[in-house]
Amino acid sequence: MKGEELRLADLVAFARERGGCCLSTELRGEGVKHRWRCGRDHEFEASPRLLMRGGYWCPQCFPSVEDPSGWNYEAQVAIDPLLRRFYRSAE
Ligand SMILES: [Zn+2]
């Protein structure tokens, strides 16, 4: 399929979907770490591939499997439009 190549605009749109923003001003590659900010002002680095294909987002808002503490679903839904969509469809 053509047109699968990632553009910076895709990163920006994706970050907005999660209620945050993309702080990197140029696309350096799908597997390369970029800088992001979530809807609660945490800054973190991750590759677009990890976030967009892996479904990951801010590591502080979404603690890892090793550290499941602090996972506040209600608070996340309030700022994360993408999550809210799933939340609604689960009702
Ligand atoms: Zn966060």
Image (cartoon, rainbow, N blue to C red):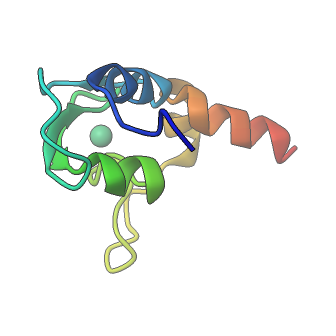
Q: Residue at x 23, y 51 (%)?
A: 47
Q: Is residue 68 above or below residue 6?
A: below
Q: Residue at x 26, y 48 (%)?
A: 30
With 14 as the anchor, is 28 left or right in this view? left
Query: For ligand 1, which image quadrant applies?
Result: top left
In the rendering, at what x and y percent does residue 55 appear? 47, 54
Q: Which of the 4 image quadrants contains residue 54? A: bottom left
Q: Which of the 4 image quadrants contains residue 21? A: top left
Instruction: Pick whichever, 35 or 41, lies toward us.
Output: 35
Count of numbered circles in the view? 0
Quarter of the image that includes the N terminus: top right
Q: Is residue 67 above or below residue 91?
A: below
Most distant residue in the right direction: 91
In the rendering, at what x and y percent does residue 41 appear? 22, 27
Q: Is residue 55 visible?
A: no
Instruction: Pick whichever, 16 or 39, lies toward us.
Output: 16
With 66 as the anchor, is 13 left or right in this view? right
Q: Is residue 12 visible?
A: yes
Q: Is residue 21 above or below residue 69?
A: above
Q: Residue at x 42, y 21 (%)?
A: 13
With 32 as the anchor, is 61 left or right in this view? right
Q: Is residue 64 above or below residue 47?
A: below
Q: Residue at x 30, y 32 (%)?
A: 38
In the rendering, at what x and y percent does residue 25 appear? 12, 20
Most distant residue in the bottom direction: 66
In the rendering, at what x and y percent does residue 2 appear? 51, 38
